[in-house]
Amino acid sequence: MSDVRRFTPMFSGMNPEDRVLDVCCGTGAQVLEYGRRGIIATGIDISPSMLSIALRNKARQNLDNIYFQLADAANLPFADGFFDYATISFGLHDKKRGERCRIVAEMKRVSLSRENVRV
């Protein structure tokens, strides 16, 4: 799993200072990987308990370039094109088709380029 997390920013062409949204971030593992690379990352999740764990993990890593926010992936609270990239690691497998489509559409909306959405 950690290999996939490390590979994602390299494969996607992310660079330090890029702004990345990780949707359905859970415990924040992918966001932390971005942060360690100097990427400005925001993780969103609909679960307060998952975000609580993500915030504890952030505190342990002492990273000031990552953020976590309670939000619905199908209705993202960000402006169009706010992020350079939008990613989701394992958050679509338990969603119904209609919800999956709404989530991916929202990820595309908030990303500067539709090509920068990684599922």
Image (cartoon, grey):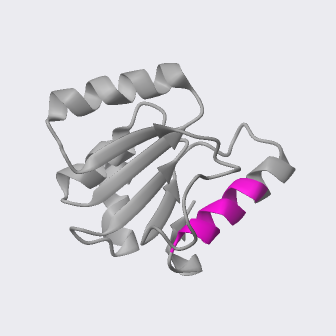
Spot occupied by residue 47 in the image (x, y as percentages of width and height): 57, 26
Q: Is residue 46 magenta?
A: no
Q: Is residue 107 magenta?
A: yes
Spot occupied by residue 14 in the image (x, y as percentages of width and height): 32, 71
Residue 9's place in the image compared with 33, above or below, is below
Question: Can residue 104 be seen here?
Answer: yes
At 50% from the left edge and 43% from the top edge, which residue is drawn? 44
Q: How many marks?
A: 0
Spot occupied by residue 52 in the image (x, y as percentages of width and height): 40, 22
Of the 4 image quadrants, the one containing the C terminus is: bottom right
- Whether residue 86 sits left or right of residue 46 in the image: it is left
Of the 4 image quadrants, the one containing the N terminus is: top left
At 35% from the left edge and 46% from the top edge, which residue is drawn? 31
At 43% from the left edge and 45% from the top edge, which residue is drawn? 43
Residue 14's place in the image compared with 56, above or below, is below
Residue 22's place in the image compared with 10, above or below, is above
At 34% from the left edge and 75% from the top edge, which residue is drawn? 13
Q: Residue furthest top?
A: 49
- Whether residue 40 sits left or right of residue 42 in the image: it is left
Q: Which residues are magenta?
A: 102-111
